[in-house]
Structures are given as C-alpha cells and as structure tokens.
Image (cartoon, grey):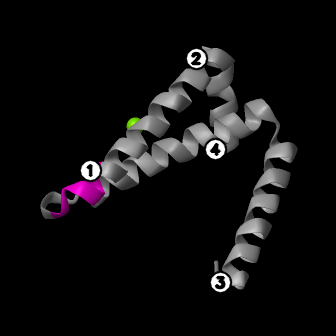
Amino acid sequence: MEKDKICKNAIQKWGIENQILKSVEELNELSSELIKYLNDKAFRNRKKVIAEIADAYVVLRQLEIMFGEDDCKKQVEKKLEKLEGIIQKGG
Ligand SMILES: [Mg+2]
C-alpha cells in the first residue's frame, strides 16, 4: 500500500488526537536515542537511531496530513530558504 494511504488509514483508525499523542511519543523517542548516541560514545547504536528516525518520519507525515500538507510544505520551503540565507552569510 502507498505510504500516504497507510498514514491516512492510521489517522482514520485511531483518530487525530491519538495520532498527535503518538507523534509526541515518537519524537521524544528520537530525541532520547539521539542524546544516548551523543552521550554514550562507547556504545553508539546507529540502528536504534535510524529506527527512531523512521518512526519520526511516519508520524511527521501524519502531522502534515492532519495540519495541512500545503501549509506545511510552504513552511518547510520558508525554513529552508532562511537556513540557506544563514549558511550563505556564514553565521
Ligand atoms: Mg519509536
């Protein structure tokens, strides 16, 4: 099944509020794995980080669908333009 269809089905099955909570949970898990990755240099677990990036990707896609894909895309473009400006300024 197409990935957007799966995301839309998840929103339909569990509802917007539950999927927002799920997003918070998954983004926290990614934060936690990234901190562990930075702090525990002897036992870095790249696979766990990648698994959490994948979870975050899936919930971020659901958030885009729930909050408006076009508005999210426009904001991403704006943020990237701003970042590009900062990089070019050398800041
Ligand atoms: Mg996770």
Tag 3: amino acid:
Gly
Report how far apart the C-alphas of labels 2 and 3 lie in the structure.
Answer: 42 Å
Q: Which residue is mark 4?
A: 3
Q: Is residue 22 magenta?
A: no
Pick the front one: 83 or 37: 83
Residue range of the region highlighted in magenta in the rendering: 36-41
Report how far apart the C-alphas of labels 1 and 4 lie in the structure.
Answer: 29 Å
- Contact, CB < 8 Å: mark 2 with mark 4? no
Q: Is residue 38 magenta?
A: yes
Q: Which quadrant holds the C terminus?
A: bottom right
Pointer 2 or 4: first along the chain: 4
Q: Which of the numbered marks, if any, corresponds to residue 49?
A: none
| Secondary element type, mark 1 | helix
Tag 4: amino acid:
Lys
Expressed as whole percent of the image width and height from the top left, the position of residue 19 reads: 59, 23
Q: Which residue is mark 2?
A: 18
Q: Which of the numbered marks, if any, corresponds to residue 36?
A: 1
| Secondary element type, mark 2 | helix
Q: In the orientation shown, which residue stands out farthest toward the front?
A: 91
Q: Can residue 44 be seen in this snapshot?
A: yes
Report how far apart the C-alphas of labels 3 and 1 lie in the structure.
Answer: 30 Å
**Crowding near pointer 4: few (<14 within 10 Å), some, many (20+)?**
few
Tag 1: amino acid:
Lys
Pointer 1 or 4: first along the chain: 4
Pointer 2 or 1: first along the chain: 2
**Crowding near pointer 2: few (<14 within 10 Å), some, many (20+)?**
few
Residue at 82% x, 37% y: name it: 68
Expressed as whole percent of the image width and height from the top left, the position of residue 42 reads: 12, 63
- Contact, CB < 8 Å: mark 3 with mark 1? no
